């Protein structure tokens, strides 16, 4: 996550610990792999209805052509994906049970805000949809350009590189 999102997560963890709760850090690699199924299922129809709605709205949408170019996936492939998803969900639930946790705290996105052209879709929010878990979103704090300076980290992949290279403290306040 970017600096304000990390600060919000740190704030929640601190407050939970101060209230007497045990906080267990979950490695995000598992979550990213599961959440990738959301994109497969959401685009499996070739985005036909979504493209139709966007075109009808008249709103500018930078990736509209890419969405139009997506293929309609055969049902047999979707059933294969469903089996793979079920296997990953079972692995996730097994880990959940091993860790004996009651809930998962996660941001919706790595970004506190950005301009439309620099938004990078990050895989946090699809997780509860793929797992078929209930989820809620609540504000924790406001971004602050005086303290939310870019994080010094080595990106693990191109998505993280893009998220962090586009982050501007002034743009999100």
Image (cartoon, rainbow, N blue to C red):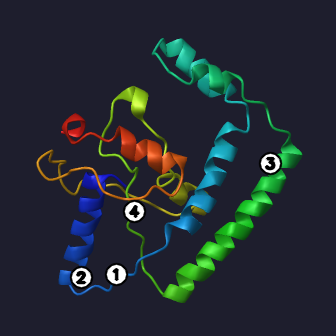
Residue shown at 21% from the left, 67% from the top:
11
Give how far apart the Cα atoms at labels 3 and 2 are. Answer: 42 Å
Residue 119 percent coordinates (x, y): 42, 35
56 and 98: which one is in front?
98
Task: Examine the image and state in which quarter residue 14 appears.
Answer: bottom left
Tell which circle, 4 or 2, labels the residue nearer the N-terminal end. 2
| Mark 3 Cα-neighbour bin, 10 Å: few <14, some 14–19, many ≥20 | some
Report the disc number at residue 78.
3
Q: Are marks 4 and 1 in contact (CB under 8 Å)?
A: no
Q: Which residue is mark 4?
A: 106
Residue shown at 34% from the left, 81% from the top:
23
Kind of element beneath mark 1: loop
Give how far apart the Cα atoms at labels 2 and 1 are. Answer: 7 Å
Evaluate whether residue 138 shows in this view.
no
Q: Is residue 70 left or right of residue 155?
A: right
For marks 4 and 3, give the one nearer the viewer: 4
Tell which circle, 4 or 1, labels the residue nearer the N-terminal end. 1
Quadrant where the N terminus sits is: bottom left
Image position of 56 with respect to 81: above or below: above
Residue 118 percent coordinates (x, y): 41, 32
Kind of element beneath mark 3: helix
| Mark 2 Cα-neighbour bin, 10 Å: few <14, some 14–19, many ≥20 | few
Task: Examine the image and state in which quarter residue 116 appears.
Answer: top left
Q: Are marks 2 and 1 in contact (CB under 8 Å)?
A: yes
Tell which circle, 2 or 1, labels the residue nearer the N-terminal end. 2
Tell which circle, 3 or 2, labels the residue nearer the N-terminal end. 2
Q: Are marks 4 and 3 in contact (CB under 8 Å)?
A: no
For marks 1 and 3, give the one nearer the viewer: 1
Q: Are marks 3 and 2 in contact (CB under 8 Å)?
A: no
Q: Which residue is mark 1?
A: 23
């Amino acid at each position: 996550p970017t600096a304000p999102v990390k600060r919000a997560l740190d704030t929640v963890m601190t407050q939970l610990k101060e209230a007497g709760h045990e906080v267990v850090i979950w490695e995000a690699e598992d979550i990213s792999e599961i959440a990738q199924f959301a994109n497969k299922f959401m685009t499996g129809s070739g985005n036909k209805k979504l493209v139709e709605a966007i075109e009808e709205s008249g709103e500018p949408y930078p990736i509209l052509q890419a969405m139009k170019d997506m293929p309609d996936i055969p049902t047999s492939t979707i059933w294969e994906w469903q089996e793979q998803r079920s296997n990953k969900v079972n692995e996730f639930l097994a880990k959940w049970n091993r860790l004996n946790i009651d809930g998962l705290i996660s941001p919706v996105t790595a970004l506190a805000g950005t301009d439309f052209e620099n938004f990078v879709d990050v895989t946090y929010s699809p997780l509860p949809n793929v797992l078929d878990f209930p989820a809620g979103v609540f504000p924790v704090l406001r971004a602050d350009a005086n303290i939310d300076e870019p994080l010094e980290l080595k990106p693990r992949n191109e998505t993280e590189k893009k998220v962090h290279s586009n982050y501007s403290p002034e743009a999100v306040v």
